Amino acid sequence: MRALVLDAEWNPRPDYELTDDEKARKRAMNSSQVWQHPELRVEEVERPKPADDEVLVKVRYAGICGSDVSMIETDDDGYMHYSAYTKFPSITGHEFSGEVVETGDDADLFEVGEPVTAEVTDYCGRCQMCRQGFHGHCENFEQIGFTMDGAFAEYVTVPEKILWSVSSLEQAYDTEDELYRAAATIEPSTISFYGLFGRADGIWPGDYHVYHGVGPIGLTGMNVSRAAGAGKVIAFEPSDERREIANELGFEHVYNPIEVDPVAKIAELTDDEGADVHVETSGAVSATYPVIENSLAEQANVVHISNAGSNPDITLRKFQGSSAQLYGSEGHTGQQVYPRTIRLMATGKLDNLPIITSTFELESADEAIKQAAKRVDGKVLIKVD
Amino acid sequence: MRALVLDAEWNPRPDYELTDDEKARKRAMNSSQVWQHPELRVEEVERPKPADDEVLVKVRYAGICGSDVSMIETDDDGYMHYSAYTKFPSITGHEFSGEVVETGDDADLFEVGEPVTAEVTDYCGRCQMCRQGFHGHCENFEQIGFTMDGAFAEYVTVPEKILWSVSSLEQAYDTEDELYRAAATIEPSTISFYGLFGRADGIWPGDYHVYHGVGPIGLTGMNVSRAAGAGKVIAFEPSDERREIANELGFEHVYNPIEVDPVAKIAELTDDEGADVHVETSGAVSATYPVIENSLAEQANVVHISNAGSNPDITLRKFQGSSAQLYGSEGHTGQQVYPRTIRLMATGKLDNLPIITSTFELESADEAIKQAAKRVDGKVLIKVD
Amino acid sequence: MRALVLDAEWNPRPDYELTDDEKARKRAMNSSQVWQHPELRVEEVERPKPADDEVLVKVRYAGICGSDVSMIETDDDGYMHYSAYTKFPSITGHEFSGEVVETGDDADLFEVGEPVTAEVTDYCGRCQMCRQGFHGHCENFEQIGFTMDGAFAEYVTVPEKILWSVSSLEQAYDTEDELYRAAATIEPSTISFYGLFGRADGIWPGDYHVYHGVGPIGLTGMNVSRAAGAGKVIAFEPSDERREIANELGFEHVYNPIEVDPVAKIAELTDDEGADVHVETSGAVSATYPVIENSLAEQANVVHISNAGSNPDITLRKFQGSSAQLYGSEGHTGQQVYPRTIRLMATGKLDNLPIITSTFELESADEAIKQAAKRVDGKVLIKVD
Amino acid sequence: MRALVLDAEWNPRPDYELTDDEKARKRAMNSSQVWQHPELRVEEVERPKPADDEVLVKVRYAGICGSDVSMIETDDDGYMHYSAYTKFPSITGHEFSGEVVETGDDADLFEVGEPVTAEVTDYCGRCQMCRQGFHGHCENFEQIGFTMDGAFAEYVTVPEKILWSVSSLEQAYDTEDELYRAAATIEPSTISFYGLFGRADGIWPGDYHVYHGVGPIGLTGMNVSRAAGAGKVIAFEPSDERREIANELGFEHVYNPIEVDPVAKIAELTDDEGADVHVETSGAVSATYPVIENSLAEQANVVHISNAGSNPDITLRKFQGSSAQLYGSEGHTGQQVYPRTIRLMATGKLDNLPIITSTFELESADEAIKQAAKRVDGKVLIKVD
């Protein structure tokens, strides 16, 4: 089958101490210290076979995530930006939709032909984290598109327990093509859904939500907030292109934080009550936290989702004066985040199709990643025929 | 000014023991044991003056509640059905919108001309319930339209602390008339909002909600559920007229429980997962609880709102087998229920205008109540010019 | 090895329709409809070998649960009382402590010699319940001592993922014997811990707790409530012996509900505020719910744990008038219930040793169960040398 | 009556812009910008009369709080350190116990002779904060001992709605003197109680708690944590005297963070799981947050209570990697914090008497404050005869 393979050289930086496990398995826990000169190639590879507890999925659409981009971007010494867990060569891509074509001998929850999407993280179900219900932080986790072959390919195998049916999206979409395009945006939507409803506590319909950063995560998040009954969805983003996409999605309160004072604007739009929910999706935390701290509604929830470029000074006094709280949040696996996000999409209220601004064929998958690296799109998809 | 006055005779039933307070103040804690031969009259009464902490409101629209109806309905001995706290004669009506026309000497939160609505229950802020934050169960409560003169009149005085501005509804409604009509339906909407978000815990966007009973509380509740991101809103109601109103509101899953097996229908619509949220708004609990118990999703929330006509047998085993919980809920005051419901309405997603099926002039207010007593409407309003 | 084996005859009642799965695997989903003439024998059986993901535990102490008793009690036709999932012949017993003696090839979380206890329910980790985090209601569950060989034996094999170390109990107990006796009472303690903290929400230190029924579950529950900072622990129990055990544990507010009016007593002890927490552990729900409903504090949590003998009438009006809620709760698996209960026991505050009122040798294990059937003990243990 | 009066000069710093309200009422919103040369005098003042909604309390014991100290400590220009809301001259002191001696005409909840304590903050019950249930952040708040005459005096008047009976402490203390001494420590205990149970969410019995800073707030907090069932209470404090007090209270895990590496020690004591609860009570946040961030258990709750001396860099990545959250918390009023803290003290488990290390007569009240300024005591009390 055709696939986009990412390869890189295993050249640990001189001052980086490899763990025994890293040495033994050639998997880097901190990729930016180990992998040099990453290279993308669309090439022919063998079609995988599902293990007993796996399902073979024919990929229909796969989205480009910021992490896919940061695996090909490098520093001056040629080391990749991405800093988490990977092995190479491998097929990347973890945001996808597809159709079940074969099921493993012990996998009986899905039928051939069923449209599906998948969670990213596979967990062991046995370690101290898993047995306490923290599957997202499994001590033995592996990830589709990072340490397991991913979805920028014609086929991908997925452990049955992290696969989810999306056939209910037929309620919201008229064509199969729309259904599969929408389904490929479920994974990024779950990031915010989990931050808002799995991590934060007490977010009510009618709350005012502010997004700091309108990239793919911010856009799908804004869509989740609106579908979940936010009183207002306000956003700040310096990129003209991305503000424009947000406007086309129907969001009217989207501003350039360089031109408009965000604190004053939030005060104006919230009648001086402040924002009940702040979602940090920009990474530019030295700029955004001063805004957040000065526009906290009483009992405000601050959900931190982005990879922060630095460690911001936090004015604790402000969090005390507003009885506010700050939640660290990231990608997640298990529990009800996927099924509820899928149901919300099935209502038609969480429609991410307008966020998709570029689509490439699998044969040009490397071009798709380079397009995403321009950081002007909503979501870039790869279409697999 | 013109007003609809309800009067009745203070004839305690022979076997009812009046409390000292009831004797002293001629206010009945259990009205159905005390008040006989209720009578409605539209008549001229003196326009009230706001006390220092009150605001005088010119009423624009006032809705008829089931309790207004039950104060004129009587048993064979002529005693009124309504069984809670009242004094008579008084002006009834507690669901309303209006315009501030005068503010008391210590009331400075509202401006003349501001469109407003009000909570029903005034609380002392001092008793053991209030000081613990349970204002809805204040030991010294009084209620607009029950023990304080209400809104079926040209003017009503309201303690400032239970008055809320609705000027933000301008975002959702183009005309002042629409705004005031919508605002008169806020109070019934808060009943379900409080049950779902103030009482129950852990309702997520995408959850499946089932309403048992589609009267005014059920209809506004279904609207709240949909605006808050319910995955599906399903309802059961024997009245053809009321199912029809629900259909016109855009709800597609509304069934006659006499013709359709509710348990099977819920299973079908939820893909056998059951309902995450059950809202009991019918009072016919001997019929609805068997349905509820047999269609509980794992960790289902059952919100009981209605005045139950009897005490149902509860199959506790079913609540254990599904890790489900049952919340008693009723009208509420204080906290964030009103402001969040108002904000949700301001988004345009919680639009109750199609629920209003009959409108009467104040001069025919007694007719309005008789129309509501037919129990075929969505909401009956009185328009006050 | 020596073991207490329970056998019974597979004689489905004429009117009971076996499922295909029941027929195929000879495991009864409703044991009381299938198993006749149960019989206990202490006999020699083969010592089990741990599978790859299992651990072999040398049992030290095992407690008798009400379900162990109900598997030997029968109706007039000789059918067992126990109504849930079993297969026979098998070794029963699921409340136990022991020492790791061998680990399977893929089991590396425990060391030989480590003192341990186990959860009862093994789950698949893959079905729709498990993947949503509801391991306690796994669609493919099996249970130690019910469908898997249990702990009334010298050795028992346990899937590693439901085994927990209890070595931290050394902080609370001076001798190994005490440690193992205490550890055998962890499982029943988790029933109430889960009900109070895993199911109910918002129980605060200082809350008043009332237990309705002082058997082994009630006693361990009262101990959990006290260790967790309850303001008062009040209990009602008709058995003189069991009230006496509660008194010896240091509980001063324990009453015979036949002699003392529970509603009046609760009012007196709570200064008329009512109980914040009611725990139903008696099963005599037609007697206890009227008490519960009339002694609800504002926002009271009612935790229903027992096997109710009938379906009580519930006065919903009372739950509305007190903003109270009712939680169905039962045994549980996964999440943090076991580790937190173990930690609480390690502090020395949750000491169940005084609850153990009878201890038998394994060779007399059948006598132990008959003693438990008298329902006068706190907890009956079997000691395995 | 005799009273400790604090006076200071109203000399706003040249660059501080007074608000209109500050000018009109001579009450400083930021005291450190306005009040110069504070001075303490024990002197004769007129005994106050309770207003209609107030109660007159004969003070028995009053504790010295850090804020009392910071009102007499000054910078090089003679401006007081305390930076919040005050007016002078006034009687300070807000942590106290006493006996009701007279009740206002509308105050009927307390009886003469009843032992009581009080919340610090009086609230209006009417503003946007109060009506939403946020009484602690009332827009029109006043505070006993800051803007209202306080408790370093023979008598103090208290609005009835913030007064609480402590007669239940008779269950825990044999003598009236002990009862009143204990009751004077309720207010500081509520600071941590509110942080742990009113602000943070999901703290379970058995959780591991770490206190960073063992002053009066840390000590009473550790006592609350232990009484509430913490699995372990661990603390770090550089002062030898204060570690000694904690040891005498029975806390065994108390360390000097200069001598012992806190991260390693927490890892050791928690078996590498990390702390479930961190309470920041030191203010030395640049030292404590690096410790906190590196010893977060999964889903850890960080409760920030202290007046931070600076704004720490927060490594958001750590909060994401552990699904942890940070709550701003401070003093609180209303809801159930006082009654539950009092009930916990009534059980005997929350015993603060050993924390009281110095007691002064009212006539030497100024000496008491100077003693507290040495920051070596647990709690310094003033005894009023």
Image: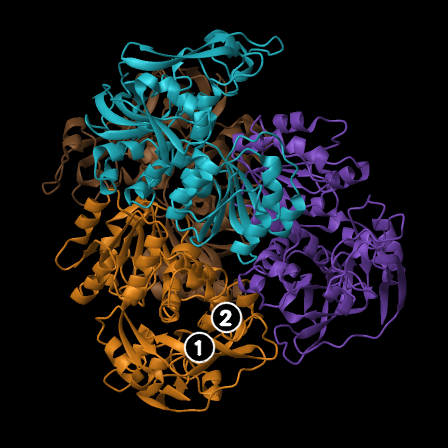
Chain colours: A orange, B cyan, C purple, D brown
Determine which quarter of the picture holds residue A53.
bottom right
Seen from the viewer's position, the closer of residues C293 and B99 is B99
The residue that disc 2 covers is A162
Tell which circle, 2 or 1, labels the residue nearer the N-terminal end.
1
Is disc 1 on the same chain as disc 2? yes
A265 left or right of B26 in image:
left
Q: Of helix, strand and loop, which one carries label 1?
A: loop
Instruction: Specify the quadrant that holds the N terminus of chain C.
Output: bottom right
Judge by depth and name the residue closer to the eye, B368 or B146. B368
- In the shown orientation, is residue A48 left or right of residue D63? right
Is there a contact, CB below 8 Å, between mark 2 and mark 1? yes
- Assign a secondary structure to mark 2: helix
Q: Is residue C103 above or below residue A268?
A: below
- The vertical placement of A236 against B174, above or below, is below
Identify which residue is drawn at 49% across, 7% down. B9
The answer to whether residue D294 of the structure is visible from this angle is yes
Q: Amino acid at mark 1?
A: Ile
Q: Which mark is residue A144?
A: 1
Residue B187 found in image quarter:
top left
Neighbor class of circle 2 (other Cα within 10 Å; few <14, some 14-19, many 20+) is some
The answer to which of C309 and D198 lies nearer the viewer is C309
Q: Amino acid at mark 2?
A: Ile
Residue C129: percent from left, percent from top: 57, 61
- The furthest residue to the left: D14
Residue D231 visible (yes or no): no
- Image coordinates of residue C371 in percent, x first then y, are 86, 50
As drawn, C364 above or below D169: below
Percent position of residue B176, x then y: 22, 33
| Left or right, residue C199 beside residue C56 | left
